Image (cartoon, helix red, strand yellow):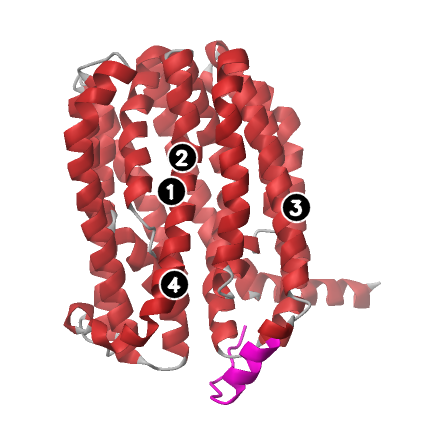
Amino acid sequence: MFGTNAISIKKLKWLLRHPLVSNGGLLAIAQYIATGLNLVTTIIAAQSLGPGEYGIVALAIAYPTLLWSFVGVKSVSITTRYIAGFRVTKESEKLKAMCKLGYGLDFILSLVAFVLVSATAWWIARFVYDIPSLSLLMITYAASFPFFSLTGTSWAILSSWQRFRWLSVFQVIDPAITLILILGFLLAGFRITGVVIATALGHTIIGIAMMFTATYMLYREGFGFWWDASLIDIAQLRKELVSFTGWNYLMVTLSGLMGQVPLMLLGYFRGPEEAGFYRLATSIVMAGSYLETSLGKVVYPVLSARWKAMEKENIKRTLRRWTFLGGVPLSLLLLLVIPFLPILIQMVFGQKYRPIVLGVQLMMIGTAISALFFWLTAFYYATGKIAMWAKGYSTYAIATIGVAWFVVQQWGFLGITTAISIGKVVFILLMLFWARQLYGFDKTSMTHIARLAENPVPKIKN
């Protein structure tokens, strides 16, 4: 009996020291602290403004965010793969050049998004929302895009060096700053305007802080300043980067559509109140997905480095272990929360938000199934199969958006949450099936491994 207990304690200690659990747990704890801060912010804003004005805030943020999704490429999904790989192979000039490309690309495209919002916000505010005064708030929010764009490559750099403690701190600081600013503006009497301006200022501050930290870390590690690098050092990757960026752009655009089109349609057909319901529901469900997101961020640079280091045969076994180690407990936890959502939502947000309960429960089921395979997105990106992932997501997104126009008019908030939940489950299962087929090691994969074997690089420890 005592021997069994000793073994169990030993296994528990090993489990807690495992990088997936320790790093993922650290990010998750920080994210849930951030979630608590976001929740407090949401409660304060929703209770202070009411469903109508809170819905107007959601509409003011929705259009700029949607437009940025069309223009931006979310380079962190690209740069993480290469920065982690170049760190393993000790190709410092290529690493710095990739940082320069990431920062520069994100900053330029965010400026383009800001200009486009400035030029078109008046039309959306007047003819779509029928709230002309909303245009200035849209432009104000979009002004934070160039600064907030700095977070992407900064995250890629810090995660490639496994600086998850620093990243955890930033995850907490970000919503803390926004909460303080929103509370201050509301106390000063600035209602809708104050919430939008406070959110924009919070994004600006965190973007600058993360860029400074990542740059300082690279300098301390002996790499110098990334802006001194020449993009010529990664010129040979131009074709691969263009393809990768193109597919990633499609993903970012469709993700933006999935996030904002339902909200805008609800605002157009059903009014600001149901738009506010949807914004609040997605915020709650997003809180449930934070642990999944944290684990995915931890495993992405690990998978990228292993793929670069030719540790292909270990990946299949690792993915299975990750599923049972992190996916199963996380999925069960989310499913256990679902029955308590009616009580929690009414207790926290009040009786007037009771209509969102069933929609949140449906979306949480989809999140629980997605969490079971938290490594799925990272797997496709790390192995360079982004085209396959993008094609699958495109099918899901286009189908969902295609039915959104109909279901929003017929069933409003509940209709669109049902459509999104069913689509997400089908998409995850389909991509899991394709992943299993891919890791049968087809001829293409074997040829790739044989080619890499001619130029061996160090193996990566877990």
Does the magenta segment cover residue 32?
Answer: no
**Residue bearing the label numbered 3:** 429
Q: Please state the extent of the stretch shown in magenta in the rendering.
A: 446-462
Give coordinates of residue 102: x percent, y percent: 27, 60
Q: Name the mark on residue 257.
A: 2
Q: Nearer the viewer, mark 1 or mark 4?
A: 1
Q: Mark 2 packing: few (<14 Cα in 10 Å), some, or many (20+)?
A: many
**Residue bearing the label numbered 4:** 80
Q: Are the residues flagged by discs 2 and 1 in contact, CB closer than 8 Å?
A: yes
- Where, by quadrant of the figure, is residue 312 drawn? bottom right
Q: Name the mark on residue 253.
A: 1
Q: Is residue 363 left or right of residue 194?
A: right
SS at mark 1 in the image: helix
Residue type highlighted by circle 2: Leu
Residue type highlighted by circle 1: Thr
Q: Which one is nearer the viewer's eye here, 265 or 47?
A: 265
